[in-house]
């Protein structure tokens, strides 16, 4: 065998190996800016996965929702057209009905109860429902609690909602929620809210402090009223069709990376909530407590009754959450 032949044979083998060992690029959908706790945690996950899989899997993060709206991205992950994402369970309800339990207003007493539930058997039940729908939830992120904000006045009692139009996430439960409180609701993509507030297409919306702040909505909606009506966890998730192709060894390492990412996110979240509250307050946003939280809660009773009538199979899950210490 001539030297030249040996070399070219070797380089052909090397090229074939390179093809086999080509990294699996996972494109990750992220709605928030780069410095947001969720995005930072996703980047940490991406780096860790590349490291522990020795470059076999190289996730990337596409921030600021540039890969499209959340409902569309959920469908894309289900179809395996996008490999991974961080999704809020709000818009998920339209696709995976069991996750609507997490969109029932006041379902969780507080964040600690949400953590206790989601990190245990209850969380597993949601993971099971998601994976049947083509989405593998690897870990759970925080999303604080959501409150109403608007351009007109403080919401102190439900009567203050009267005549105001609020943007809600894409889920019929939220339309019912706002209507039960006496306001009007319109589902809309997150990316359209700023301009819609500015031009008066809507009077308000609802979100946690970090989103209210990072989206700039506080610049155009000067009243934030602490109704704390929704505590909705978010998942760090992978397309089931992609997950199936991962070796058991890599799966185990990726799962650890996802847990670590959730810990990072939760720590950063706590800091960011406080920082965002201060920032909006300094910018002149008027923040108020609602007079009687129970008045907001009792207005939700018909929503629970209708939901359980439509989904009797989910009543036990609701009870399990309510019974979580
Ligand atoms: C944020 C959440 C996003 C998105 C957004 C919204 O709090 O992290 O995933 O759901 O709210 O209101 O659309």
Image: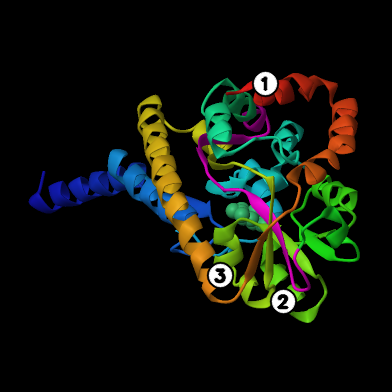
- Asked if residue 240 can be seen in this view, the reply is no
Residue density around tag 3, few if under 14, some if 14–19, many if 20 or more, within 10 Å: many
Q: How many marks?
A: 3
Q: Is residue 6 left or right of residue 112?
A: left
Residue density around tag 2, few if under 14, some if 14–19, many if 20 or more, within 10 Å: few
- Label 3 element class: helix
Q: Which residue is mark 3?
A: 280
Is 76 or 61 nearer to us in this picture? 61
At 73% from the left and 26% from the top, the residue drawn is 318
- Considering only order in the chain, which callout, 3 or 2, is on the residue closer to the N terminus? 2
Q: Is mark 3 within 8 Å of ligand 1?
A: no
The image position of residue 269, as x and y in percent, is: 47, 51
Cα–Cα gap, marks 1 and 3 = 36 Å
Q: Which quadrant is home to the C terminus? A: top right
Image quarter for ligand 1 equals: bottom right
Please give the range of residues in magenta.
129-154
- Considering only order in the chain, which callout, 2 or 1, is on the residue closer to the N terminus? 2
At 89% from the left and 52% from the top, the residue drawn is 179
| Image quadrant where residue 72 sits | bottom right
**Residue 27 in the image: above or below residue 294:** below
Q: Which residue is mark 1?
A: 320
| Image quadrant where residue 199 sits | bottom right
Q: Nearer the viewer, mark 1 or mark 2?
A: 1
Q: Are marks 1 and 2 in contact (CB under 8 Å)?
A: no
Q: Which residue is mark 2?
A: 195
- Label 2 element class: helix
Q: Which quadrant is home to the N terminus? A: top left
Q: Is mark 1 within 8 Å of ligand 1?
A: no
Residue 29: give its label: none
- Label 1 element class: helix
The image position of residue 64, as x and y in percent, is: 55, 65
């Amino acid at each position: 065998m001539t030297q030249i032949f040996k070399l070219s044979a070797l380089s052909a083998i090397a090229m074939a190996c390179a093809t086999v060992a080509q990294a699996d690029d996972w494109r990750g959908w992220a709605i928030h800016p780069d410095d947001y706790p969720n995005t930072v945690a996703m980047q940490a996950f991406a780096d860790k996965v590349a490291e522990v899989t020795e470059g076999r899997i190289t996730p990337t993060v596409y921030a600021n929702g540039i890969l499209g709206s959340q409902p569309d991205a959920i469908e894309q992950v289900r179809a395996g057209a996008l490999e991974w994402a961080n999704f809020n369970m709000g818009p998920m309800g339209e696709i995976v009905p069991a996750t609507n339990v997490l969109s029932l207003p006041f379902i969780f007493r507080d964040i600690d109860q949400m953590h206790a539930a989601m990190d245990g058997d209850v969380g597993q039940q949601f993971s099971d429902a998601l994976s049947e729908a083509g989405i593998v939830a690897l870990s759970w992120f925080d999303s604080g609690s959501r409150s109403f904000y608007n351009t007109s006045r403080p919401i102190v009692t439900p009567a203050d909602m009267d005549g105001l139009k609020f943007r809600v996430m894409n889920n019929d439960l939220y339309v019912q929620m706002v209507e039960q409180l006496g306001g009007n609701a319109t589902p809309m993509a997150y990316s359209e809210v700023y301009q819609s507030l500015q031009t008066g297409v809507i009077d308000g919306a609802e979100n946690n402090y970090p989103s209210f702040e990072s989206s700039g909505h506080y610049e155009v909606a000067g009243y934030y009223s602490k109704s704390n009506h929704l505590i909705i966890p978010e998942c760090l998730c992978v397309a089931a069709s992609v997950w199936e192709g991962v070796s058991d060894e890599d799966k185990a390492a990726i799962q650890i990376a996802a847990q670590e990412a959730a810990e990072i996110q939760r720590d950063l979240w706590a800091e960011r909530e406080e920082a965002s509250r201060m920032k909006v307050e300094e910018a002149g946003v008027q923040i108020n407590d609602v007079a009687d939280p129970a008045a907001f809660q009792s207005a939700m009773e018909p929503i629970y009754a209708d939901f359980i009538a439509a989904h009797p199979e989910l009543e036990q899950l609701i009870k399990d959450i309510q019974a979580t210490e």
